[in-house]
Amino acid sequence: MNSESVLQARDIFKSYHKDRIEVPVLRGLDVEVHAGIVTALVGRSGSGKSTLMHLLATLDQPDQGEIYFRGERIDNASRSRRDCYRNRDIGIIFQFYHLLPELSAVENVLAPTMIGQSVWNYFRTRKEARRRAEAMLDRVGLLHRASHRPTEMSGGELQRAAIARALMTDPTLLLADEPTGNLDTDTGRDILKLLSELNQCDGLTILMITHDDAIAEGADVCHRMLDGKLEETTAALQVA
């Protein structure tokens, strides 16, 4: 299967400092994500996978190296371009959900649209935006909880709401950081099934990081990380 490159990281280095001690995390890492498939980054705690995810999402910047989104260098882009990249081009789901507790499920899903538009544009299109937010909740099986706040929802429901929020702006790429890490086995299996459906039925490109080999084995391409580098790559299909 031939597939265009959506996201590419080249020769990425990243270190953190603790007092006067430099702690290397990523050490010349290269990785590429192709369109229409599920790519997994798997590694133990401390292998650098979460740091890499934050760099790919432009939530942080590498010390050295380059990150490209559809051929455009994004890591050193202007702040407004990086904000737009996170708001429109990619969707992000986190292990800890990061839903706003004072908002209902549907209001949380609406948040990216409210942030990405001017007050006037949002006011003008708010009815259409709400219909789309409700459609996203329906897509993830959570429409019946639209008016509920996070404190009134289970872990699985919180993650479904977070997925709906990430899909709200129709992103090219979904970044999923340990999406089942806080869930029990059965609920985690349901979330993985949902992500698989989004990939297979909607063609959504997904990059998922996980410490769980069983989850990684379900991906089309699996990159194993060790000590800040890719140790090996396995693929269930051929990409070019």
Image: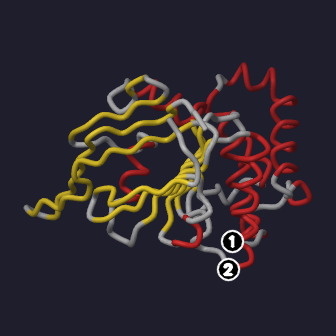
Q: CA distance from mark 2 to mark 1?
A: 6 Å
Relative depth, front residue between 217 and 80: 217
Residue at x 88% of width, y 36% of height: 131
Kindly indicate the quadrant of the structure image that contains residue 87.
top right
Mark 2 crowd level (few <14, some 14–19, many ≥20, 10 Å Cα): few
Location of residue 25 in the rendering, given as x and y in whole percent from the top left corner: 25, 58
SS category of the residue bearing label 2: loop
Q: Amino acid at mark 2?
A: Asp
Q: Amino acid at mark 1?
A: Gly
Residue at x 54% of width, y 55% of height: 208
On screen, residue 146 versus residue 72, left or right, reads: right
On screen, residue 12 versus residue 177, left or right, reads: left
Question: What residue did someone put label 1 on?
Answer: 188
Location of residue 49 in the rendering, given as x and y in whole percent from the top left corner: 39, 59
Relative depth, front residue between 203 and 74: 203
Location of residue 206 in the rendering, given as x and y in whole percent from the top left corner: 60, 47
Location of residue 179 in the rendering, given as x and y in whole percent from the top left corner: 60, 63
Residue at x 64% of width, y 55% of height: 100
Question: What residue did someone put label 2 on?
Answer: 184
Residue 120 vertical placement versus 144 (above, below):
above
Relative depth, front residue between 151 and 196: 196
On screen, residue 115 versus residue 67, left or right, reads: right
Relative depth, front residue between 14 and 33: 33
Disc 2 + disc 1, Cβ < 8 Å: yes
Q: Which mark is on residue 72?
A: none
SS category of the residue bearing label 1: helix
